[in-house]
């Protein structure tokens, strides 16, 4: 593949990712709006999750960190209805489905880089929304 066609493919991938952002925002806001699934989660704790996602290329590392948080602190919730499990379910279902769709639409070779990019955006939007939930709601 020529350098130009590789660049064209990357541009197409980024364009289709941008088109899917509304779905990501809605998914994380839905998870965070169910306040029965977690308890007084602090922005710094959520930002730690964002940092993990930004420093790995592994979906499993991100999910492992979420499970670690559940075991460590009740703020992420407990059990299958915890916020952490909701995020993991979104990663495995909604976000992976979007990533597969983007791979198909953009004729991309690999799923994982697209999936990781979507997870990072989803979590980033979550970090912003949590600030609103904790400080902005009246």
Image: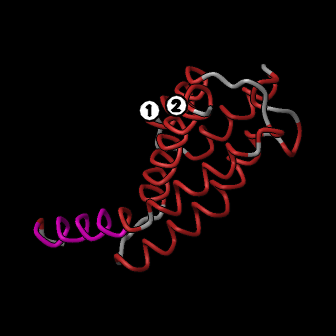
Tell whether label 1 touches label 2 (CB within 8 Å). yes
At horizontal 52% and vertical 27% (from top left) the residue drawn is 47
Q: Quadrant of residue 136?
A: top right
Residue under pointer 2:
52
Residue 48 spot, x, y in % from top left: 55, 24
At horizontal 48% and vertical 57% (from top left) the residue drawn is 112
Q: Secondary structure at mark 1?
A: loop
Residue 60 spot, x, y in % from top left: 63, 44
The answer to whether 114 is drawn above or below residue 132 in the figure is: below
The answer to whether 21 is drawn above or below residue 81 in the figure is: below
The answer to whether 15 is drawn above or below residue 50 in the figure is: below
**Left or right side of 72 for 30:** left
The answer to whether 44 is drawn above or below residue 104 in the figure is: above
Residue under pointer 1:
55
Residue 51 spot, x, y in % from top left: 48, 29
Residue 62 spot, x, y in % from top left: 60, 39
Quarter of the image with the N terminus in it: bottom left
| Label 2 environment density (alpha carbons within 10 Å; few <14, some 14–19, many ≥20) | some
**Left or right side of 118 for 9:** left
At horizontal 67% and vertical 63% (from top left) the residue drawn is 93
Q: Which stretch did the figure color magenta?
A: 4-16
Q: Secondary structure at mark 2?
A: helix
Magenta segment includes 123: no
At horizontal 49% and vertical 57% (from top left) the residue drawn is 115
Q: CA distance from mark 2 to mark 1?
A: 5 Å
Q: Residue furthest right?
A: 79
């Amino acid at each position: 593949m020529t350098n130009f066609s590789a660049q064209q493919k990357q541009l197409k991938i980024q364009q289709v990712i941008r088109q899917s952002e509304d779905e990501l925002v809605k998914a994380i806001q839905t998870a965070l709006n169910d306040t029965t699934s977690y308890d007084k989660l602090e922005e710094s704790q959520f930002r730690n999750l964002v940092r993990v996602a930004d420093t790995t290329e592994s979906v499993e590392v991100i999910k492992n960190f979420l499970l670690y948080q559940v075991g460590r602190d009740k703020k992420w919730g407990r059990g299958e209805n915890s916020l952490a499990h909701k995020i993991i379910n979104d990663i495995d279902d909604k976000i992976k489905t979007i990533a597969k769709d983007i791979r198909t639409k953009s004729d991309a070779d690999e799923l994982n880089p697209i999936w990781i990019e979507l997870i990072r955006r989803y979590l980033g939007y979550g970090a912003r929304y949590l600030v609103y939930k904790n400080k902005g709601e009246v």
